[in-house]
Amino acid sequence: MKKIKTDFLIVGSGLYGCVIAERISSILKKKVIILEKRNHIGGNCYSEVDKNTGIEYHKYGTHIFHTSIKAVWDYLKDFTKFNSYRHQVLTKYKSKTYQLPINLETINSFFGKNFSPSQARDFVTRQTKKFYKNNYNNFEEKALSQIGEKLYKAFIKYYTFKQWGKDPKNLPPSIFNRLPLRFNYNEDYYKNPFIQGIPLDGYTSIFKRLTESSKIEVIYNFNYEYENNFKVKYLTIYTGPLDKLLKNKFGKLEWRSLGFKKEVINSEDYQGTSVINYPEIKFNYTRIHEPRHLHPERKYGKKTLIIKEYPKVNNSEPYYPINNSENKERHAMYKNYLIKNKNKKIIFGGRLADYAYYDMDMTISAALNKFNIIKKIFK
Ligand SMILES: Cc1cc2nc3c(=O)[nH]c(=O)nc-3n(C[C@H](O)[C@H](O)[C@H](O)COP(=O)(O)OP(=O)(O)OC[C@H]3O[C@@H](n4cnc5c(N)ncnc54)[C@H](O)[C@@H]3O)c2cc1C
């Protein structure tokens, strides 16, 4: 069969693949083919409009853009404008709603107090002291030492259990480091980002602009395999999982996954905010998303859309890497094998190939950095 010729081949139309494609086409003026196994562009950032309500939602989970990396913002602002949305997360416990990350409002409201910041700090310290250790062996030990038993049991323990499908005693303490505790009334989810918001015309429009050059061709419903039908002049950039590329030669890399269930509600506003956590074990979902709140600047109709998020373990759709030592070693085996045994004309990047969780800004930053390396080949 005749091979299809291209200068660059990119596997995956997520942020990583599309940013590199845009740079190659506009700076190097070379032809790029992007292969995408799904039937749409955008990877997990993809957004679409719900037909019943006209509300735009994020198919693979709510995505809030936020960054403090100036180079990322300088790049992205040519492809989209952002609205004024600021992310806030709430959590429902025993039918009452509290702010997250745990802050002074959460503490006062949960314990029925009216503490000042220093009183709240002293109060929490009295509850956590007995759990202090030099080394924490697991998530639970670390959490108890930071927030004490009552807050941990209400907001964290069972949420974590549902999310990871594992007793927090069997999770590494490092995961808890990501959950901040505040002794002020700051309810912003992200800490001092340079910018945050939702693209005014949705995420998918960004991807359309990134790939609008006539030098870029996107082929959908195409699952790339190592043995293939392309004649690539310079480089293949693969953004899929490494185990799949090598047919699970060293075993499967494990991912935590999610399922989403949409519901149309006959009311303009179901919960008054974009995301509420459900930390109690009696709910088998972890969060309810209401995407109309992501676009306060838009006028939507009288019905609203809600999306329940269900954690799944070992589902075929990879969302979050399970970064235990076994998976890390396996990923290193794949990486080393590919570096040693395969030709020099294929490189890897993006969250799937790196077996890592990257926010969108980190993904863009990594893609821009990789392009700078690629560019040097042409100098
Ligand atoms: C639930 C969830 C919520 C998130 N929320 C946020 C957020 O609020 N803010 C934030 O900054 N970031 C968020 N992120 C992170 C964000 O999704 C990532 O930073 C971004 O999607 C990474 O882009 P990528 O190109 O590396 O990977 P992906 O978006 O996964 O794109 C990879 C693409 O490659 C394709 N592919 C894989 N293998 C093959 C193959 N063999 N052949 C052809 N195509 C293939 C896939 O179909 C996919 O389209 C979230 C992630 C998740 C999972």
Image (cartoon, helix red, strand yellow):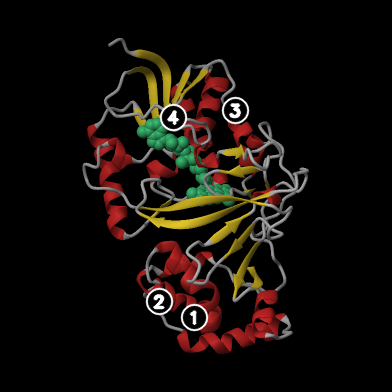
Identified by mark 3, the residue type is: Lys
Please tell me whether mark 4 sits on a helix, a strand or a loop.
Answer: loop
Label located before the other in sequence (2 or 1): 2
Q: Considering depth in this image, is 92 or 226 the residue closer to the camera?
A: 92
Q: Considering depth in this image, is 243 or 297 the residue closer to the camera?
A: 297
Mark 4 Cβ and ligand 1 under 8 Å apart: yes
> Which residue occupies 72% across, 46% down?
295
Picture layout, residue 342 above or below residue 264: above
Distance between mark 2 and mark 1 Cα atoms: 9 Å
Residue 149: horizontal and vertical position, in percent? 51, 83
Mark 2 vs mark 3: in front: 3
Please tell me whether mark 3 sits on a helix, a strand or a loop.
Answer: helix
Identified by mark 2, the residue type is: Tyr
Identified by mark 4, the residue type is: Glu
Picture layout, residue 344 above or below residue 164: above
Give the residue at mark 2: 136
> Which residue occupies 57% across, 89% down?
126
Asked whether residue 101 appears in the rendered view, the answer is: no
Give the residue at mark 1: 145
Residue 225: horizontal and vertical position, in percent? 31, 29
Give the residue at mark 3: 208
Distance between mark 1 and mark 4 Cα atoms: 45 Å
Asked whether residue 53 appears in the rendered view, the answer is: yes
At label 1, counting other C-alpha atoms closer than 10 Å, the crowd grade (few under 14, some 14-19, many 20 or more) is many
Please tell me whether mark 2 sits on a helix, a strand or a loop.
Answer: loop
> Which residue occupies 42% across, 72% down?
139
